[in-house]
Image (cartoon, grey):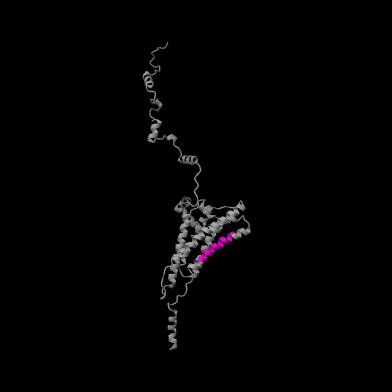
Amino acid sequence: MASTNDPFQFQEFEEAGNLLEANRDATTISIEEDNIKPDKQRKAVGFTPDGDDEDPLASDDKTELLSGPKKSVPFWTFEYYQRFFDIETHHVKERIIGSVLPWPGKNFVHVHLRRNPDLYGPFWICTTLVFAIAISGNISNFLVHLGKPNYKYTPEFRKVTIAATAIFSYAWFVPLALWGVLLWRNNKIMNLVSYSFMEIVCVYGYSLAIYIPAVVLWIIPYEWLRWCSIVVALCLSGSVLVMTFWPAVRDDHPKVIIAIMSAIAVLNILLAVGCKAYFFSKPEAVLPADSSAGTEVTKAPSST
């Protein structure tokens, strides 16, 4: 028989049992966790095990799903339009280049906007074009009358207001009308390509970028150069608009297609020709301050 005092036999420590009986709330640590801190201590010092690393994107997705749907912001608030100004500089540069150099078969919305329209680029393009038209018109008027003794230069600040009214009205009200027409036709014919209002505003805003260098060339007092720049700007700007909105109307009735595309082209032509005719019209002849006195002076030698 085996001895009852076998030294290799497992023995319980009576001292540890007595201690547990005396303090039942005491924390015990097993031998396997000798080198690992308790969970509470690890959380207190911010320690996370290597094996439990979680993907931050997955946690963000979980948080977003648990938080429920995002709160919709009304369109008349500042927060609604704030996201349209959150855009990188190189994206604006690519969109400007795409509007100045349109390529056949490439839709500006699908290639450059990618369902992410912005108002930053269109706003500054329209603002730059307003001041370019006003300043170029004043400089052109000054160069034409330069050297005439009876001419006194006075800056025409009202041109800024008129140019701003024309440019921003074209960049906002025309897209609004076009968006309404396309929405109406999309309800009639379900398979038409649809664009949002902000996408149409973005296309129209970037289509005006080509007019900025053209307006600067209008300072040179040569009518043939002005008309050549107008024709080039109209072709490039009109190409962007036509290639963008053609997929939205090509499956519609032929009369509707002709009406919509003609309206887009005519309004674009009216803007360019109207700005040239008003701000860079041929100046009137400057008459002397006292025309009657000048007549008497010219007639006096003939009477003697």
In the visual, does 37 lie left or right of 226? left
Q: Is residue 131 magenta?
A: no
| Residue beneath the point at 58% across and 60% down | 261
- Return the x and y of residue 284 as percentages of the image width and height: 47, 73
Report how many numbered discs are placed on residues in the image.
0
Please, is residue 27 above or below residue 165 in the view?
A: above
Q: Quadrant of residue 10?
A: top left
Helix, strand or loop: magenta stretch: helix
Farthest residue to the top: give it. 1
Q: Is residue 267 magenta?
A: yes
- Return the x and y of residue 52 as percentages of the image width and height: 44, 35
In the visual, does 274 lie left or right of 3? right
Q: Quadrant of residue 249?
A: bottom right
Which of the image's four quarters has the C terminus? Answer: bottom left
Which of the image's four quarters has the N terminus? Answer: top left
Q: Quadrant of residue 104?
A: bottom right
In magenta, the rendered stretch is 260-274
| Residue beneath the point at 47% across and 57% down | 123
Please, is residue 147 above or below residue 303 in the view?
A: above
Is residue 143 visible to us here? Answer: yes
Is residue 247 visible to us here? Answer: no
- Return the x and y of residue 170 as percentages of the image width and height: 51, 60
